[in-house]
Amino acid sequence: MKKISCLLFICIFITLPLTSCSKSNTLYEQNGIKMDTFMDLKAYGPNAKVAVEESFKKIDELDKMASPNISTSDVSKINNAAGKEYIKVHPEIMKMIKTSIKYSKLSNGAWDITTGPLIKLWGIGTENEKIPSDSEIKAKLPLVGYDKISINEADSSVMLQKPGMSIDLGGIAKGFTCDEVLKIYKKYNIKNGLINLGNSSIYAVGKNESNSPWSVAIQHPRNTSNSAYLGIIKISDKALSTSGDYERYFIKNGKRYHHIINPFTGYPTDNGTISDTIVADGTLNDNSMICDLLSTTVFILGREKGIQFVENLPKVDCEITTSDYNIYTTSGLKDKIQDINKDFKYVK
């Protein structure tokens, strides 16, 4: 059994419905599948339509740069030139790569964008998904390592040091894109709205029409019906991202194999974590990008190390759900998750 996140988008995050009540507070909403994910943009105000439409153009522009499945993208060019030459890249791609290296160092390698060879080997979420042999995995592990990314600042170029290496920006690109959309919202003076780029990237702009924080329901990791959720977080001018082993996976002989690959072992992460949610304050620079990459990082680190890691970061908090259905949070999210599903226990 497998799941594709773009088809389950409405199950992953449930937002309160909105209606407009005045011309000055007119709602404009547009959605569609972008970056292999169902995305939905809501904005209020006289400039709402132009802001949303310009945002979707920006999303398409960034996808053409970052997708490993587009032959002309910067990422494809970097991967194809691995071990051969430097590739000049757009500033946006350079920022994602440099930010990735920074957090790879901070997390001692738990976050690593060079897991591309392992992701391709497993093929989870594609028609080629399989359980590789131990020897196949061991053969790919030497190609993984953020320290094998070389950057030439002088001409904004990047090279992967070994032939066969490849990067995958899937755990950071949507967050970066969310930050870019927020810039467009600010450009058009959008004070209230919701930027929803799939489960990996949500930003709540201001308040909802009831002048209350936005209510975001976190998906129940083991029940994907529309009415099933783990709990609700209310946020205003904050970024939020969730990762889970239910997004893309298959089950064989009773074991779940999911898409969050541990860069140290080459196997799907197996540490008792089944989902985690990161919340970042809107005053934090690049908040959605950081949320996006941290949701993967914390999942790989696991409960104890993950919470400790986030507690040491400014303006960021997290929630972790474990396979025994316990919920743990950093101090900043203590008692902030409401309407917790009866299946779960909040451990204080």
Image (cartoon, rainbow, N blue to C red):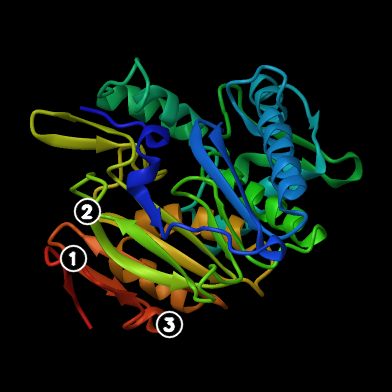
Please state which amino acid type lies under the numbered disc 1: Asn
Report the Cα–Cα distance between label 3 and label 2. Answer: 25 Å
Please state which amino acid type lies under the numbered disc 3: Gly
Res 71 → quadrant? top right
Res 160 → quadrant? top right
Could you say which is closer to the camera, residue 289 or residue 12?
12
Mark earlier in primary sequence (2, 1): 2
Dot 1 surroundings within 10 Å: few (below 14), some, or many (20 or more)? some
Please state which amino acid type lies under the numbered disc 2: Ala
> Residue 9, which numbered label?
none
At 52% across and 54% down in the image, what residue appears? 292
Tags 2 and 1 in contact by the CB under 8 Å rule? yes
Tags 3 and 2 in contact by the CB under 8 Å rule? no
Mark earlier in primary sequence (3, 1): 3
Above or below, 249 relative to 111: above
Which residue is under mark 2? 228
Q: Secondary structure at mark 2?
A: loop
Classify residue 229 as left or right of residue 157: left
Residue furthest right as drawn: 154
Which residue is under mark 3? 332
Q: Position of residue 257 (x, y in %)?
A: 24, 35
Mark earlier in primary sequence (3, 2): 2
Which residue is under mark 1? 341
At 43% across and 52% down in the image, what residue appears? 296
Classify the position of the C terminus by image quarter. Answer: bottom left
Report the Cα–Cα distance between label 3 and label 1. Answer: 20 Å
> Which circle, 3 or 1, is nearer the viewer?
1
